[in-house]
Image: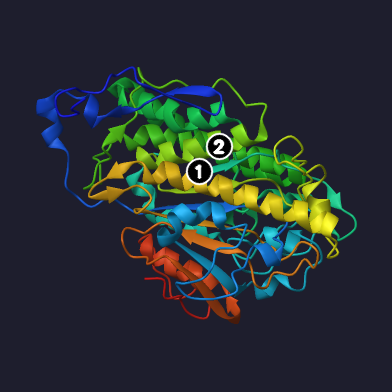
Amino acid sequence: MNPKSSPLSRRAFLRGSGVSLALPFMEAMRPLAASAASTAAKPPVRMACLYFPNGVWHPTWFPQKSGRDYEATPSLEPLQKHRENLTVFSGLDKKHSHGGDGHYAKTANFLTGLLVKKTTGKDLSVGSMSLDQVAARSTSRFTPLPSLELGIDPVISGIDSIVGYTRLYGSYISWRSPSQPVAREINPRLAFERLFGVLNAGRSASPADLQRAADRRALLDLVLDDARSLRSSLGRDDQFKLDEYLDSVRELERRIAFFSAADPREWKPSSSPDAANLVAPPGTPDSHQDHVRLMLDLMVLAFQTDSTRVSTFMFANDVSGKNFAGLIPGVNGSHHEFSHHQNKKENSEPYAKINRWHTEQLAYFLDRLAAIPEGDSNLLNNSMIFFGSSLSDGNSHQPDNLPIILAGGGGGTIRGGSHFAAPKGTPLCNLYVSMLERMGAPVDSFGDSSGSLAIG
């Protein structure tokens, strides 16, 4: 079929992960004469930060040789299709995590690189705003949603009495401030509605709707002082619930207001959400893999439609005991327990298989991004996909030599295809400095950075 003479059906559907998802409105659905109106402006760079828990089994993860002719290890083999569009890192470190016992002092600062305050939950601190939120602060005026935070596991509160940290630290990698994490959505349907429900409402809002939104914003401003007073009398968990509620109201009003102002973008996405064409997922799939891939699909859709340019995803909370029985042949037991391998084959082999499963999901995500044309390239080339864990090895709990991968072209500014073996102790935050520059949010330093990494 010749696509130039046959417009795509407005009722086309994507089918996968056990659900059907209607395509957003695309230029291919327009009458032929209207297709010529697409803009030639350069697409923006998007950034996704994907976290998996419990570190990696080194022998099957890190290549022996550095440079462009490295040999892919078993854990990295699923990514070979995208080899030229990704960089494998070794040697990166988070020095402020070395003093904290267990996992929490490493995971909570995964995207800040600063000291995590040891606390049972009354006075959280991860040192600064996280990488993703710094980027979102720069890009938020261009999109209805500043950032999208997704996960799989519900937030866990309480205290880990063994190490003396609040378990909340293990549930978040995105932080709006040193003491305020950004809420994650774990239900695919609610994540979908967050992306597109208000987006379509905003595009179809009447002047009266927009005036009501302005009135509600004014009322919200009036009650914020009362909310702050109430907050001081609440327990830590209830404070988070109140913060998330107020943030959600703010976000909803901001997104409606986004459409009442002039669009600041020179570039426009070739596909945009169409209320009559979008169908939300029915709920959370029973299969863990289907759940993960559905959330990854939503991230792709968010980037494709320019609903946001920044997203984070947690495959699981810190100290995840996920059992992959029935999902990975030969693996039946807790991920966390296998990570405490003690160099025993009966633990290290399933541990390595779980590492490989995570890179298989990354490969799926990269496949989806690469399949979407954008400008003279594709969505993957116009993105930066940061993927890694907050621990080097789950048995030692050390944060040096972190397993980190950076995929995507960063808008043509990143040269992949190599194993970047950084000198021992190189700050992970040096990579963050380089990433922020590509997101239009340049900084002199970030976290414990000592410079930037030459990834161009």
State which quadrant residue 144 falls in. top left
Query: Residue 163's spot in the image, x, y percent?
Result: 86, 61
- Residue 386: x and y in percent read 51, 57
Asked if one can make out residue 60 in the rendered structure from this viewpoint, the answer is: yes
Residue drawn at x 37%, y 65% is 414
Callout 1: SS: helix
Horizontally, residue 230 falls left or right of residue 6, namely right
219 w.r.t. 141: above or below: above
Q: Nearer the viewer, residue 70 or 148?
A: 70
Q: Nearer the viewer, residue 296 or 325?
A: 325
Judged by depth in the image, the label closer to the viewer, 1 or 2, is 1
The quadrant where residue 227 appears: top right
Instruction: Tell me which corner region of the image, top left, top right, bottom left or bottom right, holds residue 282.
Output: top right
Check the image and report above or below for 371 versus 209: below
Query: Badge 2: few (under 14), some or many (20 or more) residues near its Cα, within 10 Å?
Result: some
Tag 1 near tag 2, CB within 8 Å: yes
Identify the amino acid type marked 2.
Answer: Arg
- Residue 252 position within the rendered picture, expressed as x and y whole percent measured from the top left: 46, 33
> Can residue 308 be seen from the camera position used here?
no
Residue at 67% in and 38% down: 241
State the quadrant of the C terminus: bottom left
Mark 1 and mark 2 lie on one chain; the one further toward the N terminus is 2
Q: CA distance from mark 1 to mark 2?
A: 8 Å
- Closer to us: 123 or 224: 123
Find residue 155 and report its horizontal and vertical position in percent.
71, 41
Residue type, mark 1 in image: Tyr
**Helix, strand, or loop for circle 2?**
helix
The residue under the point 33% across, 46% down is: 142
Q: Residues within 10 Å of mark 1 (few under 14, many from 20)?
A: some
Residue receiving disc 2: 293
The residue that label 1 is drawn on is: 364
Q: Nearer the viewer, residue 122 or 311?
A: 311
